[in-house]
Amino acid sequence: MATPQMLKPLTAARKLGVLLSATPEDFQGRDISREELAELQADPPEWLRDLRRNGPHPRQEVARRLGVSASGLARAGVTEPLTTEQIKELLEARPEWLRAERETQAKVRAEEARLKERRSAEG
């Protein structure tokens, strides 16, 4: 009989898109099987739904919700996880760094799309 593949709590939290330190202690303190991870993804318990809804969110999720890169967050000095409410406040306040980073991100995405289109035309 095969032994189930186990994931470290940090890896499982990343795959679930949540901050490990915000998860329940019983999640943080043990390895998670791939089967259990699939169950959490398919039918998230209340704590997971709440974390995804309200945060605090990991850097990649904060960046996604703000429409900037993780590097852009670092350049702006945003190093701590943010809640959904804090993200909404930033989107409403539109500080100069956020405007500039969103502009940069839009240029990067446009260039990536242009290159992809060029590659597909050549291929």
Image (spheres, rainbow, N blue to C red):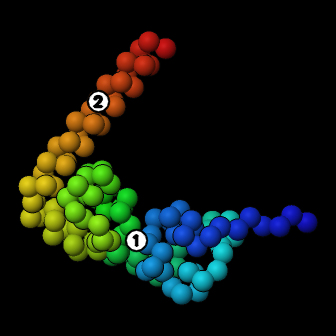
Residue at screen point 11% across, 64% down = 92
Q: Nearer the viewer, residue 96 or 33?
A: 96
Sequence-wise, the earlier of marks 2 and 1 is 1
Q: Which residue is mark 1?
A: 52
- Left or right: 52 in relation to 33: left
Residue sitting at 66 percent across and 75 percent down?
31
Report the amino acid beneath label 2: Glu
Residue 54 placement (x, y as % from top left): 33, 76
Label 2 SS: helix
- The single residue placed furthest to the right in the displayed view is 1
Tell me where residue 85 appears, x and y as whole percent.
23, 74
Relative to 29, say whether 56 is above or below. above
Vertical order, 32 against 111 (above or below): below
* Mark 1 closeness class: few <14, some 14–19, many ≥20 residues within 10 Å: some
Q: Quadrant of the N terminus?
A: bottom right
Residue 30: quarter of image: bottom right
Q: SS at mark 1?
A: helix
| Residue 49 pos. (x, y %) | 44, 75
Whole-Å distance between the Cαs marked 2 and 1?
31 Å
Nearer mark to the viewer, of 2 and 1: 2
Callout 2: few (<14), some (14-19), or many (20+) C-alpha neighbours within 10 Å?
few
Say above or below: 75 vs 37: above
In this picture, residue 53 sits left or right of residue 91: right
Res. 46 visible in picture: no
Please give the name of the residue rendered at 45% of the width and 79% of the height, measured from the top-left corner: 21
The quarter holding residue 96 reads bottom left
Q: Is residue 8 left or right of residue 120?
A: right
Residue at label 2?
111
- Residue 103: give its label: none
